[in-house]
Image: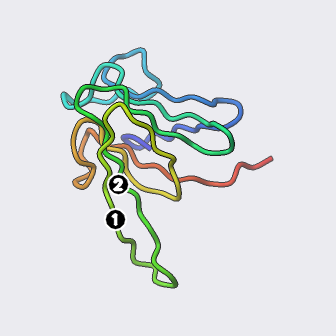
Amino acid sequence: IYRANIFVVNRTRPVLQMGRDDSNDVVIASLFASRLHARVQARDGHYVLTDLSTNGTFLLADEQSGAQSAAQSAEVHLRREEAVLGGRGWIGLGKSAARHGDHSVRFSLQPEIA
């Protein structure tokens, strides 16, 4: 989800590109984002985030702890690296996702409806 728009990655659309350039699927309106910043793709039953940028991509995952509904967050900084997405969280393009600014994309994995 970016700026109230929902973008889906699934079998029909297995790759989603994000960045500042208008040619991306998700155009990020932030100077922190590279022209082609990151990619999310379906691969081997997982969803993989790949950083393609100069400044890196920040992955802030919400992790449920036991029966508690309060989420704990752990942020990872990717630099030309990949990470498997799980659950839900935020992707920060070029800057920490903790403040959820214009450089951040919200994600949530959900079962695909057949």
Q: Quadrant of the N terminus?
A: top left
Residue 37 horizontal/vertical position (percent)? 34, 27
Question: Which is nearer the N-term, disc 1 or disc 2?
Answer: 2
Q: Residue at x 33, y 61 (%)?
A: 74
Q: Residue at x 37, y 51 (%)?
A: 90
Q: Residue at x 63, y 31 (%)?
A: 14
Type of amino acid at the residue the image marks with label 2: Leu
Mark 2 residue crowding within 10 angstroms, few (<14) / some (14–19) / many (20+): many
Q: Disc number at residue 35?
A: none
Q: Secondary structure at mark 2?
A: strand
Image side of residue 6 versus residue 74, left or right: right
- Can you say whether 58 is above or below 21 in the image? below
Residue 106 horizontal/vertical position (percent)? 41, 49
Q: Between marks 1 and 2, how big is the CA–CA gap?
A: 6 Å
| Residue furthest out toward the top | 23
The residue wearing badge 2 is 60
Q: Nearer the viewer, residue 113 or 43?
A: 43
Q: Nearer the viewer, residue 39 or 77?
A: 77
Type of amino acid at the residue the image marks with label 1: Ser
Mark 1 residue crowding within 10 angstroms, few (<14) / some (14–19) / many (20+): some
Q: Residue at x 53, y 40 (%)?
A: 48
Label count reads 2
- Can you say whether 12 is above or below 114 in the image? above
Residue 88 horizontal/vertical position (percent)? 48, 57
Q: Are marks 1 and 2 in contact (CB under 8 Å)?
A: yes
- Can you say whether 35 is above or below 8 in the image? above
Image side of residue 111 versus residue 86, left or right: right
Task: Determine the image quadrant of residue 3.
Answer: top left
The residue wearing badge 1 is 73
Residue 77 horizontal/vertical position (percent)? 29, 45
Q: Secondary structure at mark 1?
A: strand
- Can you say whether 37 is above or below 62 in the image? above
